[in-house]
Image (spheres, rainbow, N blue to C red):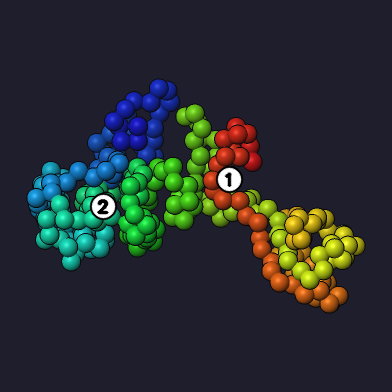
């Protein structure tokens, strides 16, 4: 819908403060996209593939070298694309999407089918674009662990409705779920914690404490040390984006 390929069932789409229906061409000139797998001519080099697209877009030839540098394919630019790894082909697809100097780049499942090395390449490339090149990147993906590592803002869609939207930072703050402490004498330590007015319980020999501020957990640790308890480990229990996603989906968007 953002690319004008299908019509929305209702409502309207606005990009850059403009109505997509009324100013489609002006808007799409500022948008680059890569939907699923890139389509390249295997017998041609990266430069030749990009040249074909460059002529359609009517942009300067110098733009080819610029986008190859952005996706770090300059050294491989004159190799036939059929010899590229999946990660390199994906980067070339992103280079094609960048040829028109877009302000918004839309990527659909950009790490789908890649090995760990290829996923790392694409993830770091996406993360660099806003800061280094001033490009806003919208990623659509079901790989929530990857989204968590690359996105600054996340939205969760449930049955066609946006049920949650916030920054990753705020999401991580909401996801904090307390602390787990491994100590020398957990039973006595729990009694001391209760005496200090904090709530907690024992689970398999570990102290499970409710969500606390940094200062509160520092006070707990200090009190334990002052009372001669050995502290072996302090771990924060934090929900992953996948946990939060399942919680949002299950509760209809209420955290």
Q: Position of residue 104 (x, y in %)?
A: 33, 47
- First-in-chain label (1 vs 2): 2
Q: Residue at x 71, y 72 (%)?
A: 232
Quadrant assignment, res 8: top left
- Find residue 248 and report its horizontal and vertical position in percent: 59, 38
Of residue 1 and residue 146, the one placed in the foreground of this image is 146
Closer-to-camera residue (136/25): 136
What separation in Å lies between label 1 and label 2 (alpha carbons)? 30 Å
In the rendered image, which residue does mark 1 sit on? 243
Q: Secondary structure at mark 2?
A: helix
Q: Secondary structure at mark 1?
A: helix
Residue neighbourhood size for the residue with mark 1, other residues' Cα within 10 Å, grouped as few (<14), some (14–19), many (≥20): few
Residue 155 percent location from the top left of the image: 49, 42
Q: Is residue 66 visible?
A: no
- Label 2: how many residues lie within 10 Å, few (<14), some (14-19) or many (20+)? some
Q: Could you tell me if residue 248 is visible in this image?
A: yes
Numbered badge on residue 86:
2
Q: Are marks 1 and 2 in contact (CB under 8 Å)?
A: no
Question: Which mark is drawn over residue 30?
Answer: none
Residue name at image x 41 percent, y 43 percent: 141
């Amino acid at each position: 819908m953002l690319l004008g390929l299908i019509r929305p069932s209702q409502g309207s789409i606005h990009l850059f403060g403009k109505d997509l229906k009324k100013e489609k061409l002006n808007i799409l000139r500022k948008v680059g996209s890569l939907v699923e797998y890139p389509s390249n001519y295997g017998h041609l080099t990266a430069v030749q593939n990009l040249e074909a697209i460059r002529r359609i877009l009517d942009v300067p030839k110098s733009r080819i070298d610029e986008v190859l540098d952005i996706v770090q394919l300059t050294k491989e630019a004159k190799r036939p694309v059929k010899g590229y790894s999946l990660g390199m082909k994906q980067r070339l697809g992103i280079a094609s999407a960048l040829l028109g100097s877009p302000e918004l780049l839309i990527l659909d499942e950009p790490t789908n089918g890649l090995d760990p090395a290829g996923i790392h390449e694409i993830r770091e490339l996406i993360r660099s674009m806003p800061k280094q090149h001033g490009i806003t990147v919208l990623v659509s993906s079901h790989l929530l662990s990857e989204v968590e590592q690359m996105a600054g803002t996340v939205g969760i869609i449930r049955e066609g409705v946006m049920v949650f939207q916030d920054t990753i930072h705020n999401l991580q703050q909401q996801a904090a779920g307390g602390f787990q402490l491994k100590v020398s004498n957990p039973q006595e330590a729990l009694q001391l914690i209760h005496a200090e007015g904090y709530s907690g319980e024992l689970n398999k020999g570990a102290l499970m404490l409710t969500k606390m501020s940094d200062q509160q957990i520092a006070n707990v640790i200090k009190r334990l040390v002052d009372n001669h308890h050995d502290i072996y480990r302090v771990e924060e229990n934090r929900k992953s984006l996948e946990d939060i996603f399942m919680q949002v989906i299950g509760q209809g968007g209420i955290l």
